[in-house]
Image: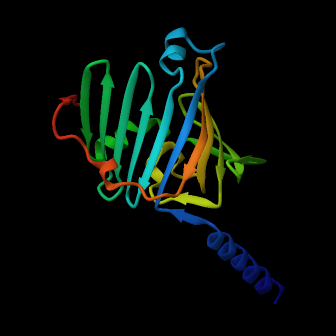
Amino acid sequence: MRLMFIIISTLLINVKAIAQQRVVAECTIVYAIAVDSSAADKNLADNLKSASKIIYIKGNNSRIDLISSAFSQSIFYDKTKGSATILREIGTNKFITKLDSAQWLKEKEEFIDMVTTITKDTKKILGYDCKKAQLELKNGKVYTLYFTPNLLSSVREVDYEFKDIPGLVLEYEVVAVDGKKVRYSATKFNLNPVPASRFDVPSSGYRILNK
């Protein structure tokens, strides 16, 4: 009888946790990017000076814009097909790369078999209570992040490395093997409708760059 009570109580707790988590199918998140100048080389620091990262989610589609004074990059990901399109602009040069699902997964091989640890540390970001987690990759790279378990993106692969994190990541720091550190901090998060035009991929003006 006691065992049955424990099982039922556990199920009720899990159901309550799931009910409290909201799946976000439409939103925009803006991240500020900061480089640890003491560990980074000058070129990296200059390229990411005043840089920002913007994530757009709409149903099964996502878009990530990385914008800096030196370059810009947009990644369009279609969750339904598992495919991606990458646009890059460096000066006057524009490139487009299209990846099918197999090619996209190969691009993300470094994240296979990474170790995820969720700690008891917490932090409030943009009004959301966030939990701390750490990802350790086989190549020695380490991610330290904060996520809110109350929200979950409808496209969990928007940042592929965070696809198994049980919540929405609002801050993270990447430390490379050589000690270079880059921090991404959410400065804006809104649930307003995202125009479908945000996910229109240009059909001309870009030179094809194959993988």
- At a point 30% along the width and 51% down the height, the residue shown is 197
Viewport quadrant of the C terminus: top left
- At a point 58% along the width and 52% down the height, the residue shown is 168
Q: Position of residue 69 (x, y in %)?
A: 44, 20
Q: Nearer the viewer, residue 133 or 43?
A: 43
Q: Which picture quadrant has residue 179? A: top right
- Compared to 40, does 150 lie above or below? below
Residue 87 as seen in the image, left or right of residue 68: left
Q: Nearer the viewer, residue 83 or 202?
A: 202
Q: Which picture quadrant has residue 8? A: bottom right
Viewport quadrant of the N terminus: bottom right
- At a point 32% along the width and 55% down the height, the residue shown is 196
Q: Please identify the residue farthest to the top as the structure is shown.
A: 42
Q: Position of residue 169 (x, y in %)?
A: 59, 47
Residue 149 as seen in the image, left or right of residue 194: right
Q: Please identify the residue farthest to the right as the structure is shown.
A: 2
Residue 43 as seen in the image, left or right of residue 116: left
Quick check: can you spot residue 201? yes
Quick check: can you spot residue 211? no
- Compared to 23, does 43 lie above or below? above
Q: Nearer the viewer, residue 197 or 61?
A: 197
Residue 205 as seen in the image, left or right of residue 10: left
Instruction: Identify the coloring.
Output: rainbow
Q: Position of residue 174 (x, y in %)?
A: 59, 30
Q: Which picture quadrant has residue 97? A: top left
Q: Please identify the residue farthest to the bottom as the structure is shown.
A: 1
> How many numbered discs?
0
Q: Position of residue 112 (x, y in %)?
A: 48, 42
- At a point 46% along the width and 45% down the height, the residue shown is 55
